[in-house]
Image (tube, rainbow, N blue to C red):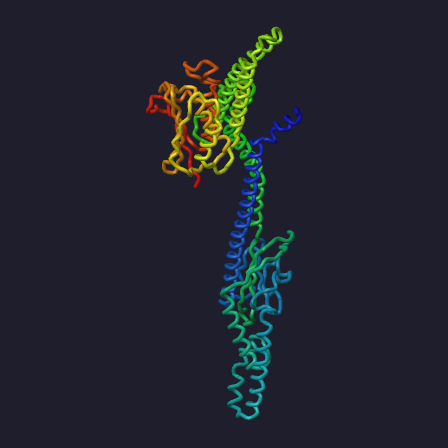
Amino acid sequence: MGERARRRGAWWNSVRARTTVAATVVVAIALTATGLILLAALRGNLVESADLQAANTARDIAGQLEAGTPLAHLRLPDPDDEPVQVVSADGRVLAADEELRGLAPMADFGPNTEAGSGDGEDSADDESDEAADEDDDSESESEDGDEDENESPRPGDTGSGFGTGSAAGAGEAGTTRAVGASAATEPEFGQTELAVGDSGPDSYRVAALGGTAPDGQPVTVYAGASLDTADSAVADVRRAMLIGLPALLAVVAAVTWMVTRWALRPVESIRSELAEIMHGDLSRRVPEPAARDEIARLAVTTNDTLAALEQSAERQRRFIADAAHELRSPIASLRTQLEVAQAHPGLLELDGLLGDTVRLEHLAADLLLLARLDAGEQPRADRVELPALVREELAHRVGDRLPVGTGLGVDELAVTGSRTQLARVLGNLVDNAQRHAATAVRVTLERRGDRAVLVVADDGPGVPEADQERIFQRFVRLDDARSRDEGGAGLGLAIVRDVVGRHEGTIRVEPADSGGARFVVELPMTR
C-alpha cells in the first residue's frame, strides 16, 4: 500500500510533469518544423540570388560577344566567385580565365551545345547540300556574269570558317545568328561542382546563355555564381538554431512547470484539506480561490458536497440516537415484564407483552423502511387505482377508535408507483387522524387537473401553524401526543413525506373545516 502511494505520488506521474513534457514536446516539434521551413526558404532565396548573379554575368559576356569583342579580350570576372567559360557547339572552351582554360566545360546544357542544337545543324546541313546542288546546276548552264554573281559572297563565307560552298556558308551563318539572338534572352540554370585553382571543388549555380562569337560561330556562355555564401549563411542559421533550441525548450519547460505549479496550487490546498477532513471534522471547508475559474467552482462544489455530507452525518447520528431511545423503551418494558413473570408467574400480563411486542415490530418496520428510502430505493412503476386502493385499505382496518368516512368523487383515478408504499401512506395518515380526532375521520379523493388529490381530515385540535412543517420530521411528536401509547414513535408522517416525495408528489397540512387538520396529498396522474 505504501509503495503504491509512493509510486502514485512520484513527480513524473503528476499533472504538472505531464503538462510540462507535453508543452515542451509540442513547442519542440513546432520550432523544428518552423526551423526547417526557414532554412529551406533561406536557401531558396540565396540560390535565387546566385541564379540572378550568374544570369547577369552571362548576359554581360554575351553582350560583349555581340558587340564584336574578340574572345581573347573579354572582360571576365574573378573566377573564384564568378567563373566564366565560352564554349563552342562541339564542346571546346574558347575563352575562360587562366585558371579555367585547361578544364572541361563546367556544364553540358545550353542552347548551342551539341545536345541542344544537333538536330538543327543536321537540317541546316541538308539544306546546304540541296542549295549547293542547285548552285552547281546553275553554274553549268549560266553565263560568266552569272558565275561572278554567284561567287561574290564567298569571301565572307570563307572568313566565317564554315563549309566550302558559298550557299552553304551563307545558310549556316544566318541560321546560327538567329539561334544565338533568340537564345540570348532566357538563360538556363543548373548546379555543378567546380575546382578553381588549387582549391577543392565548390558548389556553383551555373547560367547557360546562347551567343555568337565574332567569327560567327554559335557559342554557349557559362557563368557561375559561388554558393559558398549561401551554404555558410544556412550553416550559421542552422548552428544558431541548434544552440538556441535547447535553451528555448529549457525556458519553455521551466515556465510551464512554474505556471502549472502556480495554477494547481489551489488544487493541492483542496486535496490536503480534504485529506484532513476525511479523518476529522466535517464542519470544516476547503479554501475557495478568489478567482472565478474552474478551480474555484471545484472548491465551491466540494464545499457544497461537504455540507451535504455533514447534514447527512448529522441526520444519521440523530436518527441512530432517536432510534436507540425509542427501541430502548419497549425493550426495557418487555424485559421488566418478563423478569416479573419469572419471579411471580401469577402476575404475568400477556396483553401488555403483546402490545409492547407489536409496537416494537412496527417501530422496526418503520426504521427499516426509512433506511431503504435513505439508501435511494426507487418505488415500483405499477399502475395503481387510488379508489380501489382506498376501499381495500379501509375495509381491512380493524380496531379503529372512530369510523372512517369516505368521499370518493371518482371511480377511476390511476397513478404510477408502488401499491404497498401508497397503502402505507394512507394507513399512516388514517392512524394519525384516529390518534387526534374527536368524533370523526374522513378520507376523500378527487381529481384536480392532472393531479390526484387524497385528503385525510379529522376534527381534532389541529396542528399549529408553527408546527405544520416540523411534524414531518423524524421522531417529532407534539406536546399533546408525548405519550408513546398514544403518539407513537414520531415516524409515521416522516415516512409519508419521504414516500410521497419518491412518487413526485407533495403533502401539506392545513386547517380543516371542522376545526381539525387536513392532510392533502397530491400525486401526478398516470397518462
Quarter holding the C terminus is top left
Q: Quick one: 40 or 253, which is closer to the camera?
A: 253
Decide if residue 73 is in sight here.
no
Indicate the quadrant where residue 197 lies.
Answer: bottom right
Q: Is residue 3 left or right of residue 248?
A: right
Disc tally is 0
Residue at the far left in the pictured view: 513
Q: Is residue 444 above or below residue 29?
A: above
Image position, residue 146 (x, y; %): 51, 89
Q: Is residue 434 above or below residue 150?
A: above
Q: Quick one: 487 or 327, which is closer to the camera?
A: 487
Residue at the far front in the pictured view: 346
Image position, residue 211 (x, y; %): 53, 67
Q: Quick one: 429 or 72, which is closer to the camera?
A: 429
Quarter holding the N terminus is top right
Q: Quick one: 141 or 265, which is closer to the camera?
A: 265
Q: Is residue 381 above or below residue 354?
A: below
Decide if residue 14 is in sight here.
yes
- The residue depicted at 58 percent of the width and 78 percent of the height is 123
Image position, residue 46 (x, y; %): 53, 51
Image position, residue 483 (x, y; %): 46, 13
